[in-house]
């Protein structure tokens, strides 16, 4: 029985086509401009599909207690028209975010979950480097508390609702390996 398994394993090894696996790490430059630390790890699934996991994190508090704090995950897949990491792609992703931000004279604390669609294009700069642009929208369920001002604790209301939001706005530099 062990000889049959060994012969079978060797037959599969020497007769199957072995493809290299490609991975990438990238960062969204406009997000860095908002002091949001971010990294996107990805891998090819086959010639036309790739899986992606962008992670965004902003722990900072700015002057006058202004905040854009968040921890956001956007796991998804992309379908590439030419081949993975080259040319135009369309993507679908899940959205999960916990946030604490100020906008105008209001402060918002909450979470959001949903799905999104995106399109983009990747330019091969060298065998190891890409430049990508991506844009997309997501439909998210959000549950948040709105406060009257940046520092005070008076609640102005609690809301739970569905929203259409831009969830992918990216201009990224990507390292391929």
Image (cartoon, rainbow, N blue to C red):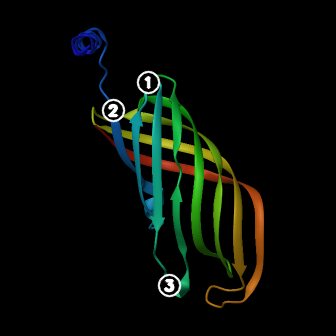
- Residue 141 percent coordinates (x, y): 71, 57
| Marks 1,3: beta carbons within 8 A | no
- Residue 5 percent coordinates (x, y): 27, 15
Q: Which image quarter: residue 65? A: bottom right
Residue in the picture at 62% in, 85% down:
150
Residue picked out by circle 2: 22
Residue in the picture at 52% in, 71% down:
69
Residue picked out by circle 1: 83
Residue in the picture at 46% in, 29% down:
87
The CA distance from mark 1 to mark 3 is: 46 Å
Question: Does label 1 or label 3 sit earlier along the sequence?
Answer: 3
Residue picked out by circle 3: 63
| Residue extending furthest toward the front | 1
Please rate how many residues cluster around mark 2, counting C-alpha atoms within 10 Å: few if below 14, some from 14 to 19, many from 20: some
Q: Which image quarter: residue 103? A: bottom right
Does dot 3 land on a helix, a strand or a loop? Answer: helix
- Residue 50 percent coordinates (x, y): 46, 33
């Amino acid at each position: 029985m062990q000889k049959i398994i060994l012969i079978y394993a060797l037959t599969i090894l020497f007769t199957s086509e072995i493809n290299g696996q490609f991975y990438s790490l990238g960062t969204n430059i406009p997000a860095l401009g908002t002091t949001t630390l971010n990294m996107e790890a990805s891998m090819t699934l086959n010639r036309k599909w790739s899986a992606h996991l962008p992670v965004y994190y902003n722990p900072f508090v700015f002057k006058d207690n202004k905040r854009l704090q968040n921890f956001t995950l956007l796991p998804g897949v992309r379908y590439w028209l030419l081949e993975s990491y080259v040319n135009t792609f369309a993507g679908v992703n899940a959205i999960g975010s916990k946030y604490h931000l100020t906008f105008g004279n209001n402060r918002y604390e909450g979470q959001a979950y949903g799905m999104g669609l995106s399109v983009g294009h990747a330019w091969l700069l060298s065998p190891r480097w890409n430049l990508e642009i991506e844009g997309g929208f997501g439909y998210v369920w959000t549950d948040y508390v709105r406060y009257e001002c940046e520092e005070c604790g008076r609640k102005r209301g609690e809301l739970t609702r569905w929203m259409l939001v831009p969830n992918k706005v990216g201009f990224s530099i990507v390292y391929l390996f």
